[in-house]
């Protein structure tokens, strides 16, 4: 404790001894840092938007499909998973490049496109101006810093529009792939169905229409013919029953295939209609909590913080320098 008190007292005495020098340095620091913050650090304005992700933007899944186990409430805010997905879209290269082109940020940032690394330069400046983060409430906040308050607010609000455009483009590409697959499968099933229908028609021309009903009717007539001792009639009926029995298996198999194809076609047509509905109609991917507006007060730099940081840095550096100087001065005196 005594050693600590001694060190503190020594530091205090050191400051008293060089109070004029320290005061001069601190005053110069205040003046210089203030001038730097005013004239050399570019002032910037901040605008921000806050949004919540939705649980789904699929019209068919949310509104049209009944008894859907994956159905979600269109009015419900999204959870962490949806927020993370939306965050990835907002940070995508397509979003960044679209913003840069729409607002001609090359000219705004004074970046010459003839410069070899112009793209890297403008991307770096853009990354320093844009902050997209997830809050503790699972909402997303998009913060834009720019020297022009109107451009800052316009960029922030442009994210709200571009977000749905980019997501729709990504999904539409997948939609087209899905429709192509469904249409290809539908054509194959139509061909199979036509072939089966032709085969079933051949059986019908040969007298086989509805096996169960025909067998029941012929069996009844066969029993009546036998009871009436109509042997010729019974023989003809027996031949028809034998004919039906020889073809029943193949006929029933074709019917089962026909029913299966019709069932699959019904599902494919329903799915194609659902995909087309989601292509032509869509819900927004976000709930807008706050839109951006042009700031009337500069947000950067915080001048008092610049001055305070400079004061602390200069003071600490001065104390260290004076302490080293005092140490060598005492050491030289002892040697003498």
Image (tube, helix red, strand yellow):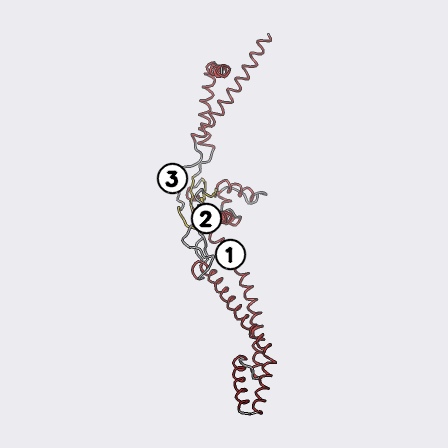
Which residue has dot 1 on it? 171
Which residue has dot 3 on it? 296
Q: Nearer the viewer, residue 106 or 264?
A: 264
Q: Position of residue 24 (x, y in %)?
A: 46, 19
- Mark 1 and mark 3 residues within 8 Å of each other at the beta carbon: no
Looking at the image, residue 264 lies above or below residue 97: below
Looking at the image, residue 275 lies above or below residue 40: below
User: Which mark lies nearer to you, 2 or 1?
Assistant: 2
Q: Position of residue 216 (x, y in %)?
A: 52, 82
Q: Nearer the viewer, residue 155 or 9?
A: 9
Q: Which residue is situated farthest in the right direction here? A: 246
Tell me the element at label 2.
loop
- Mark 1 or mark 2, which is nearer the start of the sequence? 2
User: Which mark lies nearer to you, 1 or 3?
Assistant: 1
Whole-angstrom CA distance, mark 1 to mark 3, is: 39 Å
- Mark 3 or mark 1, which is nearer the start of the sequence? 1
Looking at the image, residue 170 lies above or below residue 241: above
- Mark 3 or mark 2, which is nearer the start of the sequence? 2
Q: Nearer the viewer, residue 159 or 82?
A: 82
Looking at the image, residue 76 lies above or below residue 31: below
Tell me the element at label 1.
helix
Q: Label 3: few (<14), some or many (≥20) within 10 Å?
A: few
Whole-angstrom CA distance, mark 2 to mark 1, is: 21 Å
User: Which mark lies nearer to you, 2 or 3?
Assistant: 2
Tell me the element at label 3.
loop
- Mark 2 and mark 3 residues within 8 Å of each other at the beta carbon: no
Q: Quadrant of the C terminus?
A: top right
Count of numbered labels shown in the rendering: 3
Which residue sits at x=49%, y=14%? 2
Which residue has dot 2 on it? 79
Whole-angstrom CA distance, mark 2 to mark 3, is: 34 Å
């Amino acid at each position: 404790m005594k050693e600590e008190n001694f060190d503190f007292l020594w530091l205090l005495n050191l400051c008293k001894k060089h109070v004029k020098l320290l005061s001069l340095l601190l005053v110069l620091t205040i003046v210089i840092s203030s001038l730097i913050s005013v004239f050399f650090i570019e002032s910037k304005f901040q605008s921000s938007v806050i949004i919540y992700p939705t649980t789904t933007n699929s019209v068919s899944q949310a509104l049209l499909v009944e008894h859907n186990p994956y159905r979600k409430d269109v009015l419900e805010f999204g959870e962490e998973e949806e927020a993370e997905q939306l965050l990835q879209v907002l940070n995508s290269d397509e979003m960044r490049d679209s913003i840069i082109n729409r607002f001609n940020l090359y000219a705004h940032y004074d970046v010459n496109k003839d410069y070899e690394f112009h793209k890297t330069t403008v991307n770096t400046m853009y990354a320093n101006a844009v902050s997209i983060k997830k809050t503790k409430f699972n909402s997303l906040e998009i913060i834009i810093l720019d020297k022009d308050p109107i451009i800052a607010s316009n960029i922030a609000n442009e994210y709200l529009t571009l977000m749905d455009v980019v997501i729709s483009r990504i999904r539409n590409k997948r939609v087209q792939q899905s429709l192509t697959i469904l249409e290809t499968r539908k054509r194959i099933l139509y061909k199979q169905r036509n072939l089966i229908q032709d085969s079933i028609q051949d059986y019908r021309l040969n007298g086989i229409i509805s096996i169960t009903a025909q067998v029941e009717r012929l069996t009844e007539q066969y029993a009546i013919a036998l009871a009436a001792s109509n042997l010729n009639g019974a023989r003809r009926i027996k031949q028809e029953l034998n004919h039906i029995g020889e073809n029943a298996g193949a006929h029933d198999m074709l019917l089962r295939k026909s029913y299966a194809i019709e069932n699959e076609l019904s599902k494919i047509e329903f799915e194609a209609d659902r995909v087309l509905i989601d292509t032509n109609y869509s819900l927004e991917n976000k709930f807008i909590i706050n839109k951006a507006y042009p700031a009337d007060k500069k947000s950067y730099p915080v001048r008092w913080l610049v001055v305070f940081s400079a004061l602390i840095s200069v003071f600490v550096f001065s104390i260290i320098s004076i302490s080293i100087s005092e140490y060598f001065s005492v050491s030289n005196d002892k040697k003498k």
